[in-house]
């Protein structure tokens, strides 16, 4: 079986998470690493923290056979990696995506894909001019409970959706990353862009492109004027009530929560804050759906295995996402940011 080689840019929370997943995958190997921090280039991730999951960072990573670089552009042009995996702050995503595609590499880019619509258009143009594969880290599409919920709805088994509520509430991530960039609104876009985007994306994945959004939020609770908590109603013009809420205002002692409740004609699908996953049928029956392969417990595991398999087998990835679907979700969340600031319902303009 052909080995898939990875060039990883950034060894923060998501980069170290990806590293461990690649280590566990058969015939996948990180061959190159770029990071501005010399300690991380030496495999020291002891200062890396996150708001959900993550492994034991006390032990150094095994850097045997890994070429290290301070400059990511140098790595992209020097490495024989098949895939460039980009796990750096949001504003830098597009420049590395463009460089990696130009170098003939397949690209996996963490979310959010980009910081603004101008960067989105640059990425879209570059993808039109290449045959390389591209995926973005919209892991909730692949997260087992969310994926099963979509399959139940798409199958018609539970009937038509009447209402849906998605929540993603994190403790504050102040101090959790390089140069505390999450607290810099110009870089991160607040919780609205960095966190809530996951649920916006899944709403689009589940229901398609909304016509308009009405968003309410609060700025500057923990960050430097970013939208730190947001609530959005997605208008599909069909009478369904689709809402999502996200924020990172709570102190770091508060547990992370991601949850949803989807009320349908025949049943309600509920993923609880405690991790429980049930289908409550109208006739009183309660089921716990099978979420699949326990060796791939998260959307991170599933998306990275799928993408590396696609590269190995030379199969265009399309299981959970297409580039166009990711672009659409970015347009929606950017409209949400505008809606918060103007206090009005806004039609979504898709580019």
Image (cartoon, rainbow, N blue to C red):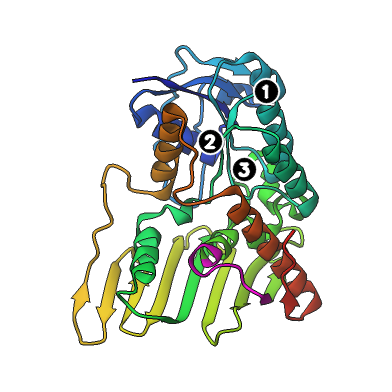
Disc 1 packing (10 Å; few <14; some 14–19; many ≥20): some
- Front disc: 3 or 2: 2
Of pointers 2 and 1, the one earlier in the residue sequence: 2
**Chain part drawn in magenta:** 203-213
Q: Is residue 145 above or below residue 60?
A: below
- Front disc: 1 or 3: 1
For image coordinates 70% across by 18% down, the residue present is 74
Tell me the quarter of the image containing the C terminus.
bottom right
For image coordinates 64% across by 24% down, the residue present is 104
**According to the image, label 3 marks what residue?**
177
For image coordinates 62% across by 60% down, the residue present is 329
**According to the image, label 1 marks what residue?**
103
Q: Quadrant of residue 11?
A: top right
Q: Is residue 56 above or below residue 342?
A: above
Mark 3–mark 2 distance (CA, rounded to whole Å):
12 Å
The circle drawn on residue 306 is: none
Disc 2 packing (10 Å; few <14; some 14–19; many ≥20): many
Dot 3 falls on a residue whose secondary structure is loop
**Is residue 54 found inside the magenta-colored segment of the image?**
no
Residue 222 position within the rendered picture, expressed as x and y whole percent measured from the top left:
67, 61
Is residue 3 or residue 175 the one in the foreground? 3
Of pointers 3 and 2, the one earlier in the residue sequence: 2
**According to the image, label 2 marks what residue?**
15
Is residue 135 or residue 32 the one in the foreground? 135
């Amino acid at each position: 079986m052909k080995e898939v080689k990875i060039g990883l840019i950034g060894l923060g929370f998501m980069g170290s998470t990806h590293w461990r997943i690649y280590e566990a995958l058969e015939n996948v190997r990180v061959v190159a690493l770029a990071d501005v921090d010399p300690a991380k280039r030496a495999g020291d991730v002891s200062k890396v923290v996150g708001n959900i999951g993550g492994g034991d960072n006390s032990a150094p990573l095994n850097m045997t056979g890994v070429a290290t670089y301070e400059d990511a552009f140098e790595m992209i042009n020097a490495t024989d990696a098949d895939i460039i995996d980009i796990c750096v702050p949001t504003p830098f995503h597009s420049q590395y995506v463009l460089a990696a595609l130009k170098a003939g590499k397949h690209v996996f880019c963490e979310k959010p894909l980009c910081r603004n619509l101008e960067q989105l258009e640059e990425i879209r143009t570059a993808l039109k001019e290449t045959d390389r594969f591209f995926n973005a880290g919209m892991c909730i599409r692949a997260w087992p409970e969310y994926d099963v919920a979509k399959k139940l709805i798409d199958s018609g088994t539970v009937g038509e959706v009447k209402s849906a509520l998605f929540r993603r509430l994190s403790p504050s991530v102040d101090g959790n990353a390089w140069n505390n960039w999450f607290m810099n609104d110009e870089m991160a876009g607040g919780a609205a862009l960095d966190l809530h985007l996951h649920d916006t994306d899944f709403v689009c994945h589940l229901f398609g492109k909304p016509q308009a959004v009405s968003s309410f939020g609060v700025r500057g609770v923990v960050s430097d004027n970013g939208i730190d908590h947001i609530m959005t109603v997605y208008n599909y013009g069909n009478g369904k009530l689709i809402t999502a809420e996200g924020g990172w205002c709570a102190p770091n002692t508060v547990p992370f929560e991601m949850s949803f409740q989807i009320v349908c004609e025949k049943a309600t699908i509920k993923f609880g804050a405690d991790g429980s996953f049930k289908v409550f049928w109208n006739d009183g029956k309660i089921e716990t759906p099978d979420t699949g392969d326990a060796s791939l417990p998260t959307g991170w595991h599933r998306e990275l295995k799928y993408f590396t398999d696609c590269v190995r087998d030379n199969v265009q990835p399309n299981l959970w996402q297409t580039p166009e679907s990711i672009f659409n979700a970015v347009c929606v969340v950017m409209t949400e940011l505008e809606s918060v600031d103007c206090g009005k319902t806004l039609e979504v303009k898709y580019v």
